[in-house]
Every structure is written in C-alpha cells, then in structure tokens.
Amino acid sequence: MRSITSRFLLVAVVGVLSICADARIADADTGSLVLVKSGEARSVVVTADEPSPVAEYAAEELVAHIEKATGARLEIARESDVPADDPRVRVYVGATDAARQVRLYPIALLDEAWRIKAAGGNLFILGREDGDELFIDGDRHDAIARDTRRGTFYGVTEFLERSLGVRWLWPGELGTYVPRRETLAVDADLDVTDAPAFRYRRYRIWRITAPVATGGYGSAVMDRMAFSE
C-alpha cells in the first residue's frame, strides 16, 4: 500500500478566499464538501511544498483509491502551486501551512494519532510523523521501515474506510475491496481524531530466529509462549 504561506494577507485577498470557501461549501446541495460528483473531480489533493515521505505516499494512496471507487483521478499539487482562486475543494494531506492557519498541528497528537477535519470549505488529513522514510532504501517493493511514524498515512486509510467503505482484507489487489460510487462528499463539520488501538505493534523477529542461532529460547516461559520448532 502507497505554501500559501503569507501571514499578512490584504483584506481584499482575505475576502476573495472567503468567497471561494463559501462557494465550495455551497456547491453541495446538502452542505457537504464534494470531492467527486458524477464521476468528475471537484477537488485537488494538496501537500506541503516539501512533503514528508509518509505524507507523499499517503496522498498517492488517497488518489489511487478514490479513482478506483469513482473513476475520477484527483490532481496532487504542492501547496504553493494552487492558485488562491482555485474553486476546487482542497484536501490537505500532512503538515501544511494551511493546516497551521486553522490551528491543526501534528505535534499536538500523540504517537501515531491522526486528525481528519473539514474547515473553511476544505478537508485536512494529518497525523503525527517524524519525517523519516517510509520504505527501506526507498524501494516500495521492499520492507516498510519499522521505526517510522505513520500518523498521516493512517489518517488517509481511516478516511478511505469511513467515506468510501474501502477494506483491506489481505495484502494485494485481490484482497482490496473498493465499492464503486459516482459521488464522494463529506460533511462540512467532519472532525475525527483517532489513533491505533495498540501503541506498540511490532513483533520482535529475533524471538523467532533466536533458537536457530542459540539452539533454544533459553527460558521455559518463552518455550511455552513462543513458536514451536
């Protein structure tokens, strides 16, 4: 699985941005943020100008699964490349200047927790990260780096489960369930904060390999609890 930065905006620019945000909200009959309508993209996925490896991969996975569900492929753009008057809903993935402007800070989240929030006519998905590489040596067909925090990626998978009904039953394409739909919209007041059920989720592989190297676990308790020969 794969800056609008100025702090001192002129009043006129603020007015334009407010009008654009209101237009994005009003586009949905139900007051929702419409990301895809009748198979047509109505949103753009936005990352920081220099996204973390986790945020970059999370954005790609978000786009890929939305396309499988709706047939619409959303553009992925860097934050400073999106014009202020762009009428599309912006789905901000990871830590961005826009997220900080609405007081969404990954550092405020614990461990690998995530936040999914609609604000100002846009959608924000971000989580606690450490900026490290997600894949060992950058090879996406190799192992995932075990010690990398992946909060933003987990936020994206949570969004896909909640909003699209996506399910990952087992690894691979065959085990990925993506229901088809024509339209994707989220509530304009959506606000979800969550975290992995277990803070520690790594199995120590040496528990398996130790008997090969030493001839046994060296503990009667481990002999009973660990793998048999």
Image: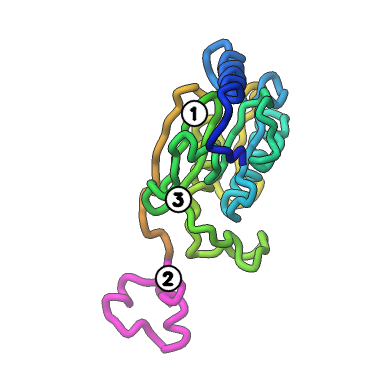
Q: Name the residue under label 1.
A: 118
Q: For residue 226, which numbered disc appears in the image?
A: none
The image shows residue 191 at horizontal and vertical percentages of 42, 30
Identify the image quadrant of residue 9. Answer: top right
Q: What residue type is labelled 3?
A: Arg
User: Few, some or many C-alpha atoms within 10 Å of disc 2 (few <14, some 14-19, many ≥20)?
Assistant: few
The image shows residue 135 at horizontal and vertical percentages of 60, 62
Q: Which amino acid does label 2 sit on?
A: Arg
User: Few, some or many C-alpha atoms within 10 Å of disc 3 (few <14, some 14-19, many ≥20)?
Assistant: many
- Inter-mark Cα distance, 2 to 1: 39 Å
Farthest residue, direction left? 221
Magenta stretch: give its range: 203-229
Q: Left or right: 224 with respect to 7?
A: left
- Inter-mark Cα distance, 1 to 3: 18 Å
Residue 180 colored in magenta in the image: no
Q: Mark 2 points at which residue?
A: 204
Which sits earlier in the primary sequence, circle 1 or circle 3?
1
Q: Name the residue under label 3.
A: 128
In terms of secondary structure, where does tag 1 sit?
strand
Identify the image quadrant of residue 37. Answer: top right
Q: Can residue 1 be seen in this view?
A: no
